[in-house]
């Protein structure tokens, strides 16, 4: 039977229908291959970091305060007290480094209460996170995670070729192209590349070098980087302060920017990372600036008061990474049972008997 190309892929069934009948959809060869590859990414991640002296940790997902800001956290009632679902294992990772663990990583759930109904956002996803003490420069972290991601990408294509081809049969794509050495492009240079190409913001203005890039900017930048460097995978370095959370170390040579980076595949972000502030006074000041009460995070700050080494870390969104690697087009297809802002819709009331022993004559 001749297949019909739908939205850049071979499919006869809409995503909505597939996701509404998920158990049946997961029985298909394509879905089975997708989740074998998801498992492979986790195994390759662990192997690469174990080899580099990291240890795996398991941090709690219930927290007494918001990790970054109160706007994007799920709050719940914890025996009459407020608690939150973790936005990331960030605080626990840093506290582990302050406890002399030196190198840690985690694979675990991450929760974001963001009403983003897009092809690349989930309210619950799996985070691949790592943190490490650094000796001289935060690029020690950048180079570590770059090596790990390259190991994963090449490992998926070389060791799991059958699964990759099975997915391509329904979701046609080219393999992710890697440069011999991953380009590391300063943020300001990336913005200049966009503006020089004639690209403009949604308001018709030049793209600002003092604000974070929007999704449409990132996708266009990915096309420009592919033209200039011949790669689908690259790193943007030195993000502006306004685009980073309170615990990010500012660039000592340019206070308007930070010692932080993002990594991209096919023009979309898969990694956010950088150096963390390890000075408790600076952390407290930054907390106040973003509306966080330092007393609510006293356990976190206490570790830095006792002394902590310079350190850096990063986080990868597993489902987004898998979606972009396989060019699935919808992150929900990379999640076993996805959670997004439209999950758990209210169910219509159904008239039922009050109790199995209730009268079958009287109306309920």
Image: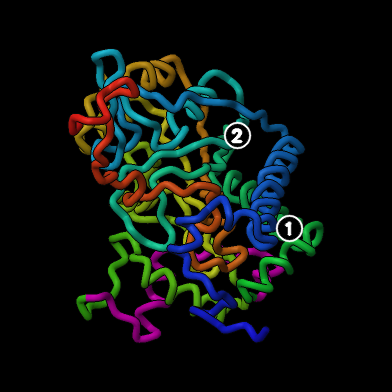
* Helix, strand or loop for disc 1: helix
Image quarter for residue 325?
bottom right
Q: Nearer the viewer, residue 32 or 175?
A: 32
The answer to whether any part of residue 215 appears in the image is yes
Q: Are marks 2 and 1 in contact (CB under 8 Å)?
A: no
What range is drawn magenta here?
174-202
Percent of width and height locating residue 274: 48, 45
Q: Nearer the viewer, residue 178 or 132?
A: 178
Quarter the C terminus occupies: top left
Residue holding disc 1: 156
Quarter the N terminus occupies: bottom right
Eye-nearest disc, 2 or 1: 1
Residue 197 on the magenta span: yes
57 relative to 269 in the view: left or right: right
327 relative to 90 in the view: left or right: right
* Helix, strand or loop for disc 2: strand
Residue depicted at x 48% and y 44%: 125
Residue holding disc 2: 105
Residue depicted at x 52% and y 34%: 311
Q: CA distance from mark 2 to mark 1?
A: 20 Å
289 relative to 172 in the view: left or right: left
Percent of width and height locating residue 213: 35, 64
First in sequence, mark 2 or 1: give its number: 2
Q: According to the image, what is the colour scheme of the structure?
A: rainbow
- Number of marks present in the image shown: 2
């Amino acid at each position: 039977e001749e297949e019909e190309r739908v939205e850049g892929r071979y499919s006869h069934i809409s995503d909505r229908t597939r996701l509404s009948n998920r158990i049946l959809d997961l029985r298909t060869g394509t879905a089975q291959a997708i989740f074998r590859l998801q498992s492979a990414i986790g195994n390759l991640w662990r192997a690469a970091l174990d080899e580099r002296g990291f240890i795996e940790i398991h941090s709690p997902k219930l927290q007494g305060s918001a990790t970054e800001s109160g706007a994007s956290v799920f709050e719940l009632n914890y025996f009459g007290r407020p608690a939150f679902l973790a936005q990331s294992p960030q605080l626990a990772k840093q506290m582990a480094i302050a406890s002399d663990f030196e190198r840690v990583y985690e694979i675990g759930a991450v929760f974001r209460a963001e009403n983003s109904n897009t092809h690349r956002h989930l309210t619950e996803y799996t985070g691949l996170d790592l943190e490490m003490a650094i000796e001289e420069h935060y690029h020690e972290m950048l180079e570590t995670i770059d090596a790990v991601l390259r190991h994963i990408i090449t490992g998926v294509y070389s060791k799991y070729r059958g699964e990759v081809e099975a997915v391509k049969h329904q979701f046609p794509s080219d393999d992710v192209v890697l440069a011999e050495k991953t380009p590391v492009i300063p943020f300001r240079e990336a913005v200049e590349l966009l503006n020089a190409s004639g690209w403009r913001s949604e308001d018709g203005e030049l793209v600002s070098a003092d604000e974070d890039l929007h999704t449409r900017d990132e996708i266009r930048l990915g096309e420009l980087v592919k033209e200039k460097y011949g790669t689908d995978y690259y790193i943007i370095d030195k993000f502006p302060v306004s685009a980073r959370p309170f615990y990010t170390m500012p660039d000592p040579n340019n206070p308007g920017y930070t010692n932080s980076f993002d990594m991209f595949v096919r023009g979309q972000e898969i990694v956010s990372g950088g150096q963390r502030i390890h000075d408790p006074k600076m952390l407290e000041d930054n907390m106040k600036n973003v509306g966080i009460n330092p007393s609510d995070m006293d356990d976190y700050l206490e570790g830095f008061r006792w002394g902590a080494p310079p350190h850096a870390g990063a986080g990868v969104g597993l489902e987004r990474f898998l979606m972009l690697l396989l060019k699935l087009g919808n992150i929900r297809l990379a999640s076993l049972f996805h959670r997004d802002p439209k999950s758990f819709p209210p169910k219509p009331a159904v008239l039922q008997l009050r109790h199995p022993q209730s009268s079958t004559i009287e109306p309920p």
